[in-house]
Image (tube, helix red, strand yellow):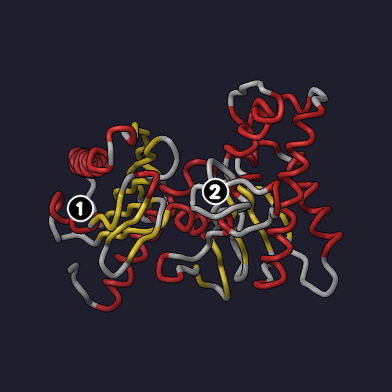
């Protein structure tokens, strides 16, 4: 199985066996600064070269799984992804043109791919109603409801673009709304808000967390603001969808209990009649999206074999 994850600043890719074992892994640059066509060309080159490596190593490629940020039209195989400069780009057709139509190609959202991997092999194993919430450059969610991963025709899970900040404190989000969760609680927002508050540029959220541990009051204020809106978001989600477990991932989960325990305490204090979820750390890290792409693709192979269908 050839698997590629285009989420994040670098492409994560590899070859994955039917049991989920990663037999080859690597990362490659994602040339976003060169434009959408360059990103697509890099993806196609990566898929072809991984296919060639698999063949050279004696493996048969059974399918291709690719996960990307943005909105994916599963029926047409097109992607809208602002951060990749893709606007209704026919990604699946481009992949078919590059490798042929002899193997299935699965195209899915990167966060849903990561959530699927956590559901199958990670922190959400054994759940039927749960949430995977990576807190990174942005914020999106993979929603597991009654045993199924919710796609919503490619639109579901954008928890980061729900509004929790109002009035003069609301900042303009990249999505065009004001006061989104992502503008306060993403890793990028924490670094940006600390810099705006202090006039001091920091090397990402990790440095803010180091300053927090050292007793910096400005870092504490920025962190507390992020925790407050995250609790709001988790309480809202819990009230609406009743997950039994929430797995937090992304770069911010590196804060460990500095992040998780306040979230548990905050959610517990707010709930009355609702079912209280476990709040845990995701366990698959940066490999989640790539592994999820492979698992989704293997499931497609299995479904096709059981139905007797051949790749389109």
Which disc, if any, is residue 19?
none
Q: Is residue 212 above or below residue 113?
A: above
Residue farthest along the front direction in this orientation: 168
Which element carries disc 1, helix, strand or loop? helix
What x and y, as percent, mark residue 194?
Answer: 68, 30
Which residue does the numbered mark 1 point to in the structure image? Answer: 95
The answer to whether 140 appears left or right of 184 in the picture is left
The C terminus: image quadrant: bottom left
Q: Is residue 108 above or below residue 252?
A: below
**230 or 110: nearer the viewer:** 230
The answer to whether 101 appears left or right of 133 in the picture is left
What x and y, as percent, mark residue 76?
Answer: 25, 67
Which disc, if any, is residue 173?
2
Q: Which residue is drawn at 35% across and 50% down?
A: 17
User: Is residue 26 at all visible to an observer of this figure?
Assistant: yes
The answer to whether 312 appears left or right of 288 in the picture is left
**77 or 167: nearer the viewer:** 167
What x and y, as percent, mark residue 21?
Answer: 42, 47
User: Is residue 19 at all visible to an observer of this figure?
Assistant: no
Which element carries disc 2, helix, strand or loop? loop
The answer to whether 295 appears left or right of 284 in the picture is left
Residue farthest along the bottom direction in this orientation: 307
Structural crowding at the residue carrying mark 2, measured as other residues with C-alpha within 10 Å and reported as few (<14), some (14–19) or many (≥20): some
**293 or 298: nearer the viewer:** 293
């Amino acid at each position: 199985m050839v698997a590629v994850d285009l989420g994040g600043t670098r492409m994560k890719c590899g070859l994955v066996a039917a049991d989920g074992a990663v037999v080859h892994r690597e990362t490659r640059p994602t040339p976003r600064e060169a434009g959408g066509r360059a990103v697509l060309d890099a993806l196609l080159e990566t898929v072809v070269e991984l296919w060639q490596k698999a063949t050279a190593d004696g493996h048969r490629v059974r399918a291709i799984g690719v996960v990307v940020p943005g909105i994916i039209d599963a029926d047409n195989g097109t992607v809208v992804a602002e951060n990749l400069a893709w606007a209704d780009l026919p990604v699946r057709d481009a992949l078919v043109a590059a490798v042929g139509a002899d193997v299935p190609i699965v195209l899915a959202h990167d966060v849903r791919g990561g959530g699927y991997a956590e559901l199958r092999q990670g922190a959400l194993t054994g759940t039927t109603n749960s949430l995977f919430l990576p807190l990174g450059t942005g914020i999106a969610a993979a929603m597991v409801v009654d045993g199924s991963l919710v796609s919503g025709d490619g639109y579901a899970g954008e928890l980061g673009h729900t509004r929790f900040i109002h009035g003069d404190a609301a900042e303009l989000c990249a999505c065009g709304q004001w006061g989104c969760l992502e503008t306060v609680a993403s890793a990028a927002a924490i670094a940006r808000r600390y810099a705006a508050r202090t006039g001091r540029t920091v090397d990402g959220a990790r440095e803010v967390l180091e300053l927090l541990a050292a007793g910096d009051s400005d870092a504490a204020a920025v962190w507390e603001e992020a925790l407050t809106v995250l609790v709001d978001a988790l309480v809202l989600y819990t009230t609406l969808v009743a997950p039994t477990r929430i797995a937090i991932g992304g770069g911010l989960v590196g804060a460990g209990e500095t992040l998780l325990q306040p979230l548990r305490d905050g959610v517990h204090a707010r709930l009355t009649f609702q079912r209280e979820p476990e709040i845990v750390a995701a366990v698959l890290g940066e490999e989640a999206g790539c592994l999820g792409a492979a698992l989704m693709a293997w499931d497609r192979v299995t479904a096709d074999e059981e139905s007797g269908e051949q790749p389109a």
